Image (spheres, rainbow, N blue to C red):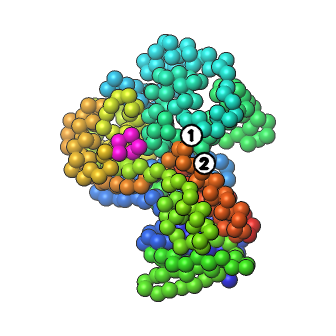
């Protein structure tokens, strides 16, 4: 009998498997696809390095740093360039840098004087009831505490950049729990943030998050874990049966036309919610899953384009530019990839990644590469002064990109909690449970590995 069987070899499943193996646990990892790492993938072509999924890893805590060090990846780390610290938001058709100092906050044209004065009054606005807070959307929270301009030209584009989502749909307590905690604990965002900072300083838990990648791209991490786990991973394997036993679980899966059967004490599931529902569960588990709503996964296109640097007027001195809904444009934003990290483009060239689609534009879900390129080039000419044609192209289309933590998330999570409570030894994780960021998925793997069956 295995100590654990893990369904899904994304970064959550790989992290959990590695940590269990480290404790001399016997494990099996089942992956339906021919590759591991989920959406994390890196392409190298013609001197360009393209991330087809996540573009960076925001290290969430010290443990993640030690985890990478343990994997001997410290020397492979690349910090984001100080040159790329600016974040741009498009307003009235041009990118404006988000203020990063008090002086810039006073002088920025991104917000009106009325909006700036309104923000200063944020600590004096009364919080809503705990009952109302449970279902409050991101848009409702931000407009209530900071005003509509901050919603339109700060939070709305940020939500599109992170979730490819809609601030009017996402539930704050699920999508941005830290923001929810600020009001819950400090009765205001500003007071709550100050209170948290003081508490962290007192207990030594303060940590400055770092945006990193690896010299050869983010795929370095899943590739490293896959190499360590070796033949414990079974790729191109389809689960055919899940049976509950007295002392655990028995799974049957198919690989290369052959059936395999294995029992385990602990079953870990770290795959998307729609894939969870398609597994061959015992009837009582399937009934609970069928009664829960489906999470929305909007389609997103990630179009990476290489240009001669001289063909772009904008200094590209930032992380990228996000586009608010209010601007009524055809892209979600553009990342200045070769400005963020080195070695992303040949000398005298630059690499940009244009994000298209998302919850905002479902009508763009099925556009082909020709149409997507037309949209991207038109927008780049208008926004950053592009005058030339691309010297490199790479398109990654995700029909189901990022789970939306909207009103369906609470009943979905309640169903998962109910299943776990009723079925000892069965545990769920990944970006449909523990947060959508890559760092959150790593920590999800850590959490799953620490649960005792």
In the displayed structure, 393 sits above or below 19; it is above
Name the disc covering residue 410, or none.
2
Which residue corresponds to the image point at 33% horizontal and 31% vertical from the top-left?
328
Viewed as shown, does residue 100 lie left or right of 326?
Answer: right
Foreground label between 1 and 2: 2
Mark 1 Cα-neighbour bin, 10 Å: few <14, some 14–19, many ≥20: many
Looking at this view, is 73 or 387 the one in front?
387
**Relative to 81, does residue 400 appear above or below in the rendering?**
below
Q: Which secondary structure, mark 1?
A: loop
Q: Where is residue 281 in the image (x, y as percent from the top left)?
A: 57, 71
Residue 120: where, in percent of width, then height?
60, 16
Choose the circle earlier in sequence order: 1 or 2: 1
- Magenta-drawn stretch contains 409: no
The Cα atoms of the two marked residues, 1 and 2, are separated by: 9 Å
Residue for point 72% across, 28% down: 186
Specify whether residue 2 is in view: no
The image quadrant where one finds the C terminus is bottom right
| x, y percent for residue 380 | 28, 36
Q: Residue at x 56, y 16 (%)?
A: 118
Question: In the image, which disc is placed on residue 38?
Answer: none
Q: In this view, does 302 lie above or below 148?
A: below
Near mark 2 (Cα within 10 A), the count class, few <14, some 14-19 or many ≥20, is some
Choose top left, top right, bottom left or bottom right for residue 349.
top left
Which residue is denoted by mark 1 in the rendering?
171
Quarter of the picture containing the N terminus is: bottom right
Q: Pointers 1 and 2 in contact (CB under 8 A)? A: yes
The image quadrant of residue 27 is bottom right
Residue 243 in sight from this viewpoint:
yes
Q: Which element is circle 2 on?
A: helix
User: Residue 128 sits in which quadrant?
Assistant: top right
């Amino acid at each position: 009998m295995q100590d654990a069987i893990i369904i899904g070899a994304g970064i959550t499943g790989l992290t959990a498997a590695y940590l269990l193996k480290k404790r001399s646990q016997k494990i099996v990892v089942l992956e339906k696809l021919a590759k591991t790492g989920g959406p994390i993938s890196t392409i190298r072509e013609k001197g360009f390095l393209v991330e087809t999924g996540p573009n960076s890893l925001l290290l969430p805590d010290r443990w993640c740093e030690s985890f990478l060090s343990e994997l001997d990846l410290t020397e492979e780390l690349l910090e984001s360039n100080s040159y790329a610290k600016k974040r741009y938001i498009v307003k009235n058709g041009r990118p404006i840098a988000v203020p990063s100092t008090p002086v810039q906050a006073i002088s920025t044209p991104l917000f009106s004087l009325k909006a700036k004065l309104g923000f200063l009054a944020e600590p004096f606005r009364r919080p809503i009831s705990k009952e109302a807070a449970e279902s409050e959307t991101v848009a409702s929270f931000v407009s209530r505490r900071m005003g509509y301009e901050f919603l339109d030209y700060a939070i709305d584009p940020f939500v599109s950049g992170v979730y490819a989502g809609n601030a009017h749909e996402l539930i704050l307590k699920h999508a941005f729990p830290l923001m929810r905690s600020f009001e819950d604990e400090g009765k205001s965002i500003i007071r709550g943030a100050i209170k948290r900072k003081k508490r962290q300083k007192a207990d030594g838990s303060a940590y400055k998050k770092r945006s990193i990648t690896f010299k050869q791209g983010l795929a370095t991490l899943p590739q490293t874990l896959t190499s360590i786990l070796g033949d414990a991973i079974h790729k191109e394997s389809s689960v055919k049966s899940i049976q509950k036993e007295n002392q655990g679980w028995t799974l049957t899966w198919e690989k290369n036309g052959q059936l395999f059967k294995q029992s385990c004490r602990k079953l870990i599931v770290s795959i998307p919610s729609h894939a969870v529902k398609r597994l061959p569960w015992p009837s009582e588990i399937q009934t609970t899953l069928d009664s829960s709503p489906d999470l929305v996964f909007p389609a997103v296109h990630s179009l990476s384009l290489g240009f001669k640097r001289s063909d772009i007027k904008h200094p590209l001195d930032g992380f990228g530019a996000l586009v608010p809904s209010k601007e009524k444009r055809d892209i979600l934003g553009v990342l200045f990839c070769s400005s963020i990290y080195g070695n992303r483009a040949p000398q005298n060239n630059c690499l940009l990644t244009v994000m298209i689609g998302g919850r905002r534009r479902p009508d763009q879900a099925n556009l082909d590469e020709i149409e997507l390129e037309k949209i991207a080039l038109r927008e780049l000419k208008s926004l950053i002064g592009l005058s030339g044609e691309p010297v490199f192209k790479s398109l990654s289309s995700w029909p189901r990109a990022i789970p939306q933590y909207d009103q369906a998330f609470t009943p979905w999570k309640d169903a998962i909690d109910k299943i776990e409570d009723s079925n000892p030894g069965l545990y769920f994780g990944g970006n449909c449970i523990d947060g959508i960021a890559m760092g959150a998925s790593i920590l999800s793997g850590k959490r799953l590995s620490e649960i005792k069956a």
